[in-house]
Image (cartoon, helix red, strand yellow):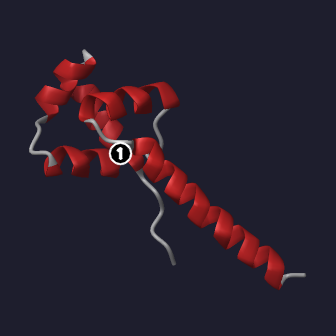
Amino acid sequence: MATEFHIGRLLQQKLRDDERSVTWLAQKLNCSRTNIYLMFKKQYIDCEMLMRLSIVMKFDFFECLSREYKIKLKSTNAENKTTI
């Protein structure tokens, strides 16, 4: 079984990989650290926030989301072919 996509965990890992702090990200987004920690718990984040995160962190989170979409689409197509 495939691992479920979780943007919050991806965000947290990217922040860690870049050796950036939650405080740094909160300052860049002009929000509280609490809001950043809440984002870590979210499986999905709205498009506007995802865009802001991508710009601030210089990382295309949309590409990751698109990759996940393609995997699910391929899986769905494969399931549909086997039931025909």
Screen quadrant of the C terminus: bottom right
Q: Residue, x 85% and y 82% (percent of image)? A: 83
Most foreground residue, 36 or 17: 17
Most foreground residue, 31 or 76: 76
Query: Residue 49's spot in the image, x, y percent?
Result: 42, 27
Q: Which residue is mark 1?
A: 8
User: Horizontally, is 20 left or right of 49 in the view?
Assistant: left
Q: Amino acid at mark 1?
A: Gly
Query: Residue 51's spot in the image, x, y percent?
Result: 42, 29
Query: Residue 4's spot in the image, x, y percent?
Result: 48, 62
On screen, residue 29 above or below 5: above
Q: Residues within 10 Å of mark 1 (few under 14, many from 20)?
A: some
Q: Secondary structure at mark 1?
A: helix
On screen, residue 33 above or below 45: above
Q: Residue, x 66% and y 69% (percent of image)? A: 74
Q: Residue, x 82% and y 79% (percent of image)? A: 81
